[in-house]
Image (cartoon, rainbow, N blue to C red):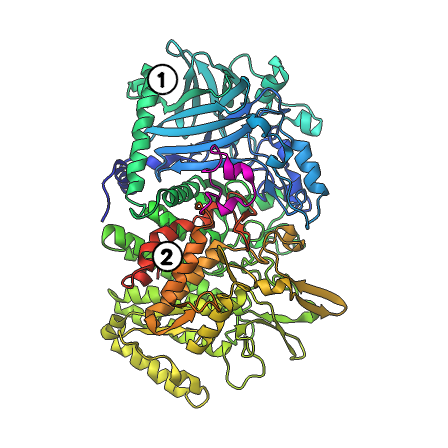
Amino acid sequence: MTANTPEHRRLEQARTGEIPWKSWGPYLSERQWGTVREDYSAGGDAWNYFTHDQARSRAYRWGEDGIAGICDDRQRLCLALALWNGADPILKERMFGLNNSEGNHGEDVKEYWFYVDSTPTHSYMKCQYKYPQRAFPYMDLLATNRSRSKQQMEYELLDTGIFDDNRYFDVVVEYAKDAHNDIVMLVTADNRGPDAATLHVLPTLWFRNTWSWEDGHAVAKPTIAAVDGNSGITTARASHAELGEWLLRAAGSAELLFCENETNNERLFGVPNASPYVKDGINDYVVAGNREAVNPERTGTKVAAHHVLEIPAGDSASVRVRLTASEVAESGASSGKKGLAKPFERLFSTRRDEADQYYATLVPPTLKPDGAMVMRQALAGLLWGKQYYEYNVHRWLLDHGVNPWDPAAPATSVRNVQWFHMLAGDVISMPDKWEYPWFAAWDLAFHCAPLSLVDVDFAKEQIELLLRTRYMHPNGQISAYEWNFSDVNPPVTAWAALYVYEREAEIRGEGDRQFLTRVFDRLLTNFTWWVNRKDPDDRNLFQGGFLGLDNIGIFDRSAPLPGGGTLEQADGTAWMALYCQWMMQIAAELAKHDPAYVDMVLKFVSHFVWIAVAMNPPEADTTLWNEQDGFYYDVMRMPDGQTIELKVRSLVGLLPLCAATVLPADLLERHPELFERLTEGIARFSDALPQLTQLPGPNPEGRRMVALVDESRIRRILEVMLDEDEFLGPHGIRAISRRHLEQPVIFDWGGQEYNVHYLPAESDTGMFGGNSNWRGPVWFPMNLVILRGLVQLHGYYGDRLKVECPTGSGRELDLLEVASEIATRLATTFTEDEKGRRPVYGGIEKFQTDPHWHDLLMFHEYFHGDNGAGIGASHQTGWTGTVALLYVMSGALNAEEGAVEAVGE
C-alpha cells in the first residue's frame, strides 16, 4: 500500500504529470573529461585527448560536469559549486583524478566527497566535500602514482599529508525545492583547522554549449545577464529559447562574475579567441587576479556569485542562492523575494523533516540506527548517480569522418560504427558519478532493484530505456557500454524487470502488466540474438566473451584465444539458463491474464532443458562439470577437436548453481496442459537422454523446480563455495577461490605462460587497459545473484537440504540460513564492528577514528576478499547500492513464508 508522506505525494504528482518534480535534479556529472563522447582524436585515445587540465578551459560537446551540481533534465542550464582556498593553482570546479594511463591500478579519483541524502524527486539533497586548505597536490598525486607498480598500493590524497592538523573545510551542499521550478541552494563550510582561514565560495550557473557546433541548423545562443534586484539581493537572469527565463539570486555582498562557456583556444592551442571572456575567465579572475578575464558588461553564458568568507577555527559560514523560473519569482510566489535567510531556514527544516518521514516508510523498523544510516546513504548515492547522457552516434561518427552509409568507405578503428542508429538524450542511472560518466547495461539492470525501493516509476523507465528502438541494435543486441557497445554484458534485464514488477505490485496492489508485456516482447528479440550469435556451434553452449567479468579468466575472453581455440563458458551458458528461467517466469505471470503466453512458458522451459543437457551431456569425453573436483570450469575447444579444461575456481563455476527457479504450484493447476506437453516432449528423447526422465518431481508443497544442478552437485559446489579457505570470505563470496593464492593456475601455450592467482584487492595485470580487478575481491551484484539462487533452491528443498556453513564447522544450515549468513557478511562491510570500526575503510585511520569522517560512506566498486576494505572506484554506488536490498530482505530471509518473492523472483 502506498504511504502518504509529502514526498510520496510529490512522486504521485510526477507520475501522473500533474507537477514535473523531477525536471531538475543531480543530473550533472562529476566528470565529463576523458569520455568516449568527447574524444575526437585520430587514434581513439579518449583518456588523454581531453584531460582534467584542459577541462577548465575547454568547452564540452556532449555534457557538463561540476561539484555537487544540478541541471534540468536535458542539461541546458547547470548550477554547481566552485571553491578556492587561496592557495590552489586553479579554481576547484570539478573533482580531480587520474586517467587509466596515469594510475598504477587504472583510473581513480583523488578526492573525498559523499552523497549523504536525497529524496527521489530531489526535493531535498545533501552532499559533503572535504576541501583542503593547503594547495591541492595535483602533481604529487600524478607523479607518485605513475611511479608505482601494479604490485604497490595506490597513493591517495590522505597519504599526501594535506589533511594533517585537520586543515580543511567540510563543505556541505544542500538543495531544497520550494516548487519544481524554484530551487534553493545552501552551502555551509566548517573550518576544521586550528586557525582562521579564507574560503572563496562560488555557486556557478552556466549554459551547456550547444551553439558552437555545426549541427546543420542555427542554434540560438542563450544569455545570462545581471539585473537590478531587491535591496540586499544580487540577481542574474538566464534566458534560453526552450527553457525560458530563470533568475539566480544571491546575497547582496556577492560579486557576479561573467564569462562565456567557450574554449580558451589561445591557452590550449595557441590560436586567437573569438571572445576575450572564455570558459576559464572566472578562474583567472579569482586565482590570478586578472580583472580583464571577466566581462565588465556583466553578461555571458556563465556566471559565478563570488563570496569571500573568513571563517574562524572551529566555526562555520554559509552561502545561500536561489534559482527560480522568472514567472514564479515575478509572481511573488517564491519566498526568496522576501529575503535569502529566514525563508531558507524554514524551507530546509521542512524538507529535511519530510525526507525523514519518507525514509521511515522504507527502512525496516527493526534495523539498528547504524544499518539504517548505511541503507539511506546507499539509496542517496543511487539517486545522486542519475546523470543526463547525450550521444548522437551518427553525428559523432560524421564528426570523425566516418559515413556508415558508404559501402566503399575503408575499414576504420573508430568506435561504435555499427551503432550509428543510437540516439541518446536521457537521464540515466550511472554506475559511478565520476569514474563512469556513461551507462553499462548490466550495471543499470542491477541499479533498478534498489531504485525500485525509492522510485519504482524511475526504475521502470530505466529498465525499458536500453530496449528502446533508438538504443537497441536492430539485430536485437543490447548495447553494453560506451567504450564498445558491441561487447556483451550478462543478460540480467529480465530479472530486474521481474523485481521491479513485483515491487510495484507490493506498493500499488497490482503490477504493471503492460510494462511487463513490453519488456518481454523486446527481450524476445534480444534472447534470439543471444541464441543466434553466441552459440556458434548450435550446441546450447554459449560463448558470451567478456560478460562483464574483465579479468576473471586466464585470457581476455573477448579477444582471439591462443591457437585459434573457442571457449565454452560455464558462466555464459549459466547466464543463458537464467535468462530462460526469468523469461519463463515473466511468461507465467502474463499467462495469468492471457493464455497465449502459456506456449511461451513451454518455449523457455524447453530451451532451459536443452541447455541443461548441453552442460551435462551423456557419454561425453569432456563436459563443463569436473566430477573429481565437484566444480564447473570453462573448456577451450581447439580447431583439431582437442578440449582443454581451464581449471580456475571462480564465479564462473558458481553461476550454474544459481540457475534455479521454483515454479509455483498454482501454475500447473491453472495450466495442466503445460506439464502434459512438457512430459510428452521429454518422452520423445528418453532413449537418448535418460536423465530427462529424472527431473525433480513436485515437492511436498506441490512446487516444481527447474535447475542446472541436482542435489548431489548442489552439495558439492556448496562445499567449495562455503569453505572459508576458498570462496566464503568474512564479507561475502569472493570472485576467485583463495586456494589460488598458494595454487595458482598456470597455462602454457606456444611458449607463452598465462596464469591466474588469487588477488584480494587490485589486479596486477594490464588486461583490459589495467582496469581489471576480478581476481579475488567481493562484488555485491554477483553475491546478489548467488543469494537469489540459494533462496530459490530453498523454496524447493526447504529444510530437507542442509549443508555445513562454513564448511568443516559442523554447523548445519538450510539454504535460506546460508543465504542469510552471506547477506549478513555482506552488510557488515559497512556497519560498525564490535570495536566501532567499519571494514569498508580498512586501515585508513582518518575514517575509522575521526568523528567528522567515520559516518560518511563510500560505496566502492568491489571489496577486499579478506578484510572487506573498499577497493576500486570509490563511488560505484550503482550496483554496490544493492546493499540496501539486504536490509529489506533481512526480515524475509529469516522467515519461510514469502522468502522467494522477497529476493525478487
Three-letter code, disc 2: Ala
Q: Which residues are magenta?
A: 834-859
* Horizontal relation, residue 57 to residue 79: left or right: right
* Horizontal relation, residue 821 to residue 639: left or right: left
The residue located at (28%, 61%) in the rendering is 898
Is residue 31 placed above or below 637 in the rendered structure? above
Q: In the rendered structure, are the residues bearing label 1 and label 2 in contact, judged by CB atoms less than 8 Å apart?
A: no
* Horizontal relation, residue 344 to residue 150: left or right: left
Quadrant of the rendered structure where residue 677 is? bottom left
Using the image as rendered, state which of residue 254 and residue 147 is in the foreground.
Answer: 147
Q: Residue furthest right?
A: 751
Quadrant of the rendered structure where residue 24 is? top left
Q: Secondary structure at mark 2?
A: helix
Q: Earlier in the sequence, mark 1 or mark 2?
A: 1
Locate residue 572, reporting x and y percent: 52, 66
Prevalent SS, magenta region: loop
Q: Secondary structure at mark 1?
A: loop
* Residue for badge 1: 341
Q: Residue furthest top?
A: 231
Regarding residue 76, the answer to whether it shows in the image is no
Q: Is residue 140 magenta?
A: no
* Residue for badge 2: 497
Q: CA distance from mark 1 to mark 2?
A: 45 Å
Q: Label 2: few (<14), some or many (≥20) within 10 Å?
A: many
The residue located at (50%, 74%) in the rendering is 540
Three-letter code, disc 1: Ala
